[in-house]
Image (cartoon, rainbow, N blue to C red):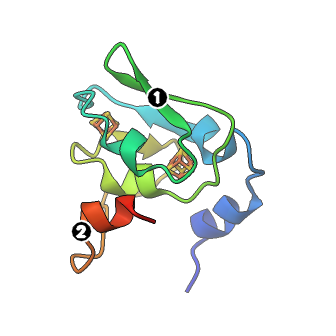
Amino acid sequence: MMTSNHKKNFEYPIGTGITKDLTVNDACVGCGMCARLCPTANIKIENGRPVFGNKCLSCGACIQNCPQNALHHNKEKSGARYRNPNVSVEELMQI
Ligand code: SF4
Ligand code: SF4
C-alpha cells in the first residue's frame, strides 16, 4: 500500500523535488555515496556535505542508501531505512 509520504513524493515536481524537504544531519561524514547513487547527478559534495541541485526526481535513493542515515525528510515518522539486500550498491550505480 502506498503511504501518504510516498504519494507526496509523486506530487513533487522535477527540480528541487523532495530535496526541499530534506535535512542533512550531523551524522553525515561526506562519504559521497548519495552523490554516486543519484541517477540524475543532482548531488555534489561541498565542504563535506551534500548539496542538491535542480534535477531531483524524488526517487529516494540518496535517503535510503546513506550509510550514516544522515538524510531525513522533515515530516518522516520513522528513520528506518530499507534497501534490497539482493541488489548491491555497485549494481545500483550502473542503473
Ligand atoms: S551518503 Fe550520507 S554520509 Fe555520505 S555524503 Fe551523503 S548524506 Fe553524507
Ligand atoms: S537520489 Fe533521487 S531523491 Fe536523491 S537527489 Fe537524486 S534524484 Fe533526488
Query: Does residue 56 appear to the left or right of 94 in the view shown?
Result: right
- From this viewpoint, which residue is outermost toward the bottom? 1
Rendered position, 56 above or below 95: above
Percent position of residue 93, x then y: 37, 58
Report which quarter residue 88 is drawn in: bottom left
Look at the numbered disc 2 and say if its residue's Cβ is closer than 8 Å to ligand 1: no
What amino acid does circle 2 point to? Ser
At 31% across and 35% down in the image, what residue appears?
Answer: 32
Name which residue lies at 46% across and 28% down. 44
At 29% from the left and 76% from the top, the residue drawn is: 84
Q: Quadrant of residue 47?
A: top left
Does residue 34 sit above or below 27 in this rendering?
A: below
Q: Secondary structure at mark 2?
A: loop
Q: Check disc 1 and report its element: helix, strand or loop.
A: strand
Q: Position of residue 78 (x, y in %)?
A: 37, 58
Q: What is the three-letter code of the residue carrying label 1?
A: Lys
- The foreground one among 47 and 71 is 47
The disc at residue 88 is: 2
Q: Which mark is residue 89?
A: none
Q: Which residue is mark 1?
A: 44
Q: Quadrant of ligand 1?
A: top left
Q: Is residue 18 left or right of residue 24?
A: right
Q: How many marks on residues? A: 2
Q: Position of residue 31 (x, y in %)?
A: 24, 33
Q: Residues within 10 Å of mark 2 (few under 14, many from 20)?
A: few
